[in-house]
Image: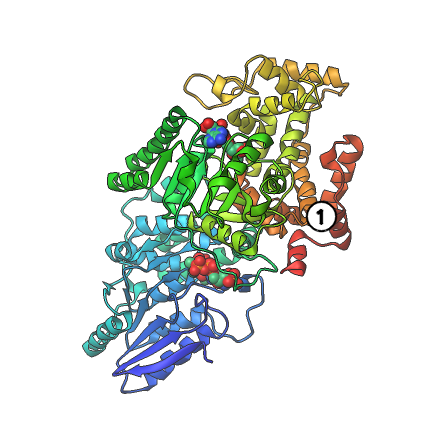
């Protein structure tokens, strides 16, 4: 079947792109469009041409796979389509539904006119793939939308909905009824008008505010630190102002090509496909469909439970939230109301919407009220005894087929499931991240006996909550927290060996992490680890390496930001970490206690000792089957732990360093330091010896 259909409707030629699922510009599509334009122009009975997408949208842009594959020789490209449109004496009209993204919008903007349905959206998301638009988007969008709006769209990559696109001048008409019918009427009228039709390139571009580009650079400086693409976008739009049209297009193309080759873009494309792969669970057929979850329950209205209840509401599912006492319930509901009120204050939600959301949450202290819930998430205290008690109670009240999940951070969910053997296939984990209503990641913990249908349903609910659900197996800390122990562990140990907290945090911030590890520990609260260590027995007198300084700080009441002192000092009203000589002294004491040489550190050692344990432990998790693919591990780190997206995640990034180098360093640190997280992973060793990467591993093991 041809990728582009050609049909005549009266005097209008309709070219329909049929390249499911999203009408990407794969080889054959540009050729089909160019041939269609030529055919229409050769036919005297045709007065206008409509370009429309078959299926769920217009055109989703270039076929992203081809940025890593050779484009077939002689095959037409965007440039040919655009040249054909602009040379066409008959008007070309883009008829947009679903999405016109990237090259899709660029194609539409090269048409003489654009019509759109109200639900569609248009955008230039290329920056999210690590490059600027490359088919004239940075030259045409400013001419249609004006410099300021175009710059915002191109640099953020965020799409706009049809009504806004119309108000901005990107599209000419919003069609309320049937798109094709509306487009045909529009095209017939334009075709009958005759004469020249406006080309976007001919619109004059004015620069009202000469400081606009510098201001944009400043605005994104922190968010885009370490990245090239957002700044490349600005350069391209600047070229639209400084150069005449064709020279601007040429300049854009040069910058685009340079960026496509960059490690940043390779990483971001890796993330794009990783997110799509994460939805697929090998061995579970597409025929297994999610069940309907009409009502939900949440146990515990503490830090996590409240946010999880909000997530259900976001997914349109009414939820009952349970606490032990009315007081705890009121406190929890108060925090939920405060969170919604903050969203209202920011103008992102109306008061009516807030009231409706609160109305969808039923607070109660009676477990019996969970009798009609299809899915119940437990977020009570993190001890096995309490979890088992709660699940046993749920066993008594919940519907026989209700899905029961635990938000535990570390506990063995198989053991929890075994406590209620009759419901074994219905118990699994949903590990949300704090704040649960904000953070995108949820680890869906697959227990030994959970049914495929319940797993698929839980993944689906995660997506309906607008989260990124990642399947993980049952192991201590699952994917993220298990790896984190190596990262935090090394940061704490390096402090005891003489590295200053500020140096460690500066190195990791410079690498691109949202915050350095010690600042994160201060934020999370040092007392959490301290009390865990105390619970594990032996008090803290038996200081383990890496826990010495933290234990002393906690004994001094320095729990981190909440007490204004931790690894750093925080002045009143400030979150800025200020180094403290007292901590340096504790570090020196630790070195003496453990017999470490107290020494200065090179930045490179800090980087390796923070990041290589992530890779080494990640490799074990992968080999054990506790992660389905290395790219899932990357997504966990990108979405739960502030890892920079443009590095592609720790496993992808390790491939850019070279697994042989990483493996060599892991062996070296294992020999000199000896800690468990340095024990070389056999999978890392194997891939290093084969000269492969974790991306290669995923390709060879794709299920
Ligand atoms: N190229 C290749 N494959 C694509 C694609 C693209 N542009 N867009 C989506 N796909 C694939 C996905 O990988 C997925 O494949 P799979 O089923 O094998 O996993 C399938 O299409 C469906 O995609 P989604 O699951 O994302 O479908 P949704 O309906 O949720 O979303 C969408 C649709 C909003 C179009 C979303 O897919 C999307 O954002 N796509 C990317 C758009 C984009 O970035 N375009 C710019 C490309 S770069 C460009 O155009 C360069 C130009 O300036 C020269
Ligand atoms: P929290 O202490 O803030 O809240 C727990 C709530 O559960 C308390 O309000 C308590 O009154 C309530 N509760 C205890 N037993 C109950 C019962 N039988 N019935 C109803 N309510 C009961 O704890 P938090 O931080 O919300 O943690 C909850 C779970 O989420 C834990 O398993 C924790 O490990 C996990 N988690 C916590 C994260 C965090 O950052 N706080 C992140 C991810 C997971």
- Residue 591 percent location from the top left of the image: 72, 18
Q: Which residue is mark 1?
A: 659
> What residue appears at the point 75 percent right and 19 percent down from the top-left corner?
594
> What residue appears at the point 74 percent right and 39 percent down from the top-left corner?
666
Q: Is residue 635 above or below residue 84?
A: above
Q: Quick check: 288 left or right of 586? A: left
- Residue 363 percent location from the top left of the image: 36, 34
- Residue 222 percent location from the top left of the image: 46, 37
Q: Quick check: 117 left or right of 274? A: left
Crowd rating for badge 1 (residues with CA inside 10 Å; few <14, some 14–19, many 20+): many
Q: Is residue 367 above or below residue 168?
A: above
Residue 98 or residue 621, whichever sits in front: 621
Which residue, as the protein is rendered here, is positioned at the far right? 671
Residue 685 or residue 217, whichever sits in front: 685
Q: Is residue 675 above or below residue 5?
A: above
Q: Quadrant of the C terminus?
A: bottom right
Which residue, as the protein is rendered here, is positioned at the far bottom? 44
Q: Is residue 246 above or below residue 344?
A: below
Dividing the picture into quadrants, the one containing residue 194 is: bottom left
> What residue appears at the point 32 percent right and 76 percent down from the top-left corner?
88
Instruction: Tell me if residue 131 can be seen.
Output: yes
Instruction: Tell me if residue 219 can be seen.
Output: no
Q: Quick check: 34 left or right of 116? A: right
Which residue, as the protein is rendered here, is positioned at the far front? 396
């Amino acid at each position: 079947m041809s990728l582009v259909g050609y049909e005549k409707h009266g005097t209008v030629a309709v070219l329909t792109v049929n390249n499911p699922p999203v009408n990407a510009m794969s080889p054959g599509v540009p050729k089909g469009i160019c041939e269609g334009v030529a055919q229409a122009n050769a036919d005297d009975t045709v007065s206008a041409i409509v370009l429309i997408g078959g299926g769920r949208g217009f055109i989703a842009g270039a076929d992203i796979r081809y940025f890593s594959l050779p484009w077939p020789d002689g095959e037409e490209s965007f440039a040919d389509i655009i040249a054909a449109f602009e040379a066409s004496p008959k008007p070309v009209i883009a008829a947009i539904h679903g999405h016109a993204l990237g090259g899709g919008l660029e194609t539409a903007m090269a048409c003489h006119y654009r019509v759109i349905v109200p639900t569609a959206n248009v955008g230039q998301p290329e920056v999210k793939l690590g490059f600027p638009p490359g088919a004239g988007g940075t030259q045409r969008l400013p001419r249609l939308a004006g410099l300021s709006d175009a710059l915002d769209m191109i640099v953020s990559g965020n799409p706009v909905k049809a009504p806004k696109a119309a108000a901005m001048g990107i599209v000419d008409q919003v069609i309320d009824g049937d798109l094709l019918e509306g487009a045909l009427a529009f095209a017939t009228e334009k075709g009958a008008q005759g004469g020249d039709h406006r080309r976007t390139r001919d619109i004059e571009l004015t620069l009202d505010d000469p400081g606009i580009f510098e201001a944009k650079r400043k605005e994104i400086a922190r968010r885009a630190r370490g990245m090239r693409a957002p700044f490349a976008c600005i350069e391209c739009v600047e070229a639209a102002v400084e150069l005449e049209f064709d020279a601007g297009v040429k300049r854009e193309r040069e910058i685009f090509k340079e960026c496509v080759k960059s490690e940043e873009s390779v990483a971001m494309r890796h993330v794009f496909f990783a997110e799509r792969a994460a939805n697929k669970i090998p061995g579970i057929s597409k025929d297994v469909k999610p069940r309907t979850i009409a009502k939900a329950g949440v146990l515990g209205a503490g830090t996590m439970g409240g946010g999880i209840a909000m997530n259900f509401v976001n997914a349109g599912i009414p939820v009952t939230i349970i606490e032990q006492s009315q007081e705890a319930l009121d406190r929890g509901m108060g925090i939920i109301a405060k969170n919604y009120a903050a969203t209202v204050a920011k103008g992102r939600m109306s008061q009516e919407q807030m009231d409706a959301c609160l109305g969808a949450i039923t607070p109660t202290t009676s477990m019996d009220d969970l009798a009609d819930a299809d899915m119940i998430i437990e977020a009570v205290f993190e001890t096995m005894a309490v979890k088992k008690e709660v699940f046993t109670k749920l066993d008594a009240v919940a519907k026989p087929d209700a899905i029961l999940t635990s938000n535990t951070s570390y506990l063995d969910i198989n053991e929890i499931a075994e406590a209620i053997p009759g419901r074994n296939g219905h118990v699994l984990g949903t590990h949300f991240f704090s704040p649960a209503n904000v953070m995108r990641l949820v680890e869906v913990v697959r227990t030994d006996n959970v049914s495929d249908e319940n797993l698929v349903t839980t993944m689906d609910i995660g997506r309906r909550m607008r989260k990124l659900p990642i399947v993980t197996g049952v192991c201590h800390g699952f994917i993220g927290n298990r790896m984190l122990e190596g990262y935090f562990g090394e940061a704490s140990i390096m402090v005891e060996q003489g590295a200053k907290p500020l140096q460690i945090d500066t190195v990791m911030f410079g690498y691109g992490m949202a915050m350095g590890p010690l600042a994160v520990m201060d934020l999370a609260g040092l007392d959490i680890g301290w009390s865990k260590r105390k619970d594990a027995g032996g008090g803290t007198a038996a200081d383990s390496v890496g826990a010495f300084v933290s234990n002393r700080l906690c004994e001094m009441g320095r729990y981190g930001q909440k007490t204004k002192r931790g690894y750093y000092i925080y002045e009143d009203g400030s979150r800025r970490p200020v180094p403290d000589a007292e901590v340096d002294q504790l570090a020196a004491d630790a070195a003496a206690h453990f017999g470490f040489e107290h020494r200065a550190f090179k930045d490179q050692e800090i980087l390796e000792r923070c990041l290589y344990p992530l890779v080494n432990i990640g490799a074990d998790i992968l080999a054990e089957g506790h992660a389905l693919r290395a790219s899932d591990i990357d997504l966990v780190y990108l979405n739960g732990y502030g890892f920079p997206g443009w590095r592609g995640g720790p496993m992808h990034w390790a491939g850019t360093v070279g697994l042989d180098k990483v493996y060599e360093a892991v062996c070296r640190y294992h020999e000199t330091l000896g800690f468990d997280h340095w024990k070389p992973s056999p999978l890392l060793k194997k891939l290093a010896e084969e000269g492969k990467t974790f991306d290669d591993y995923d390709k060879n093991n794709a299920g």
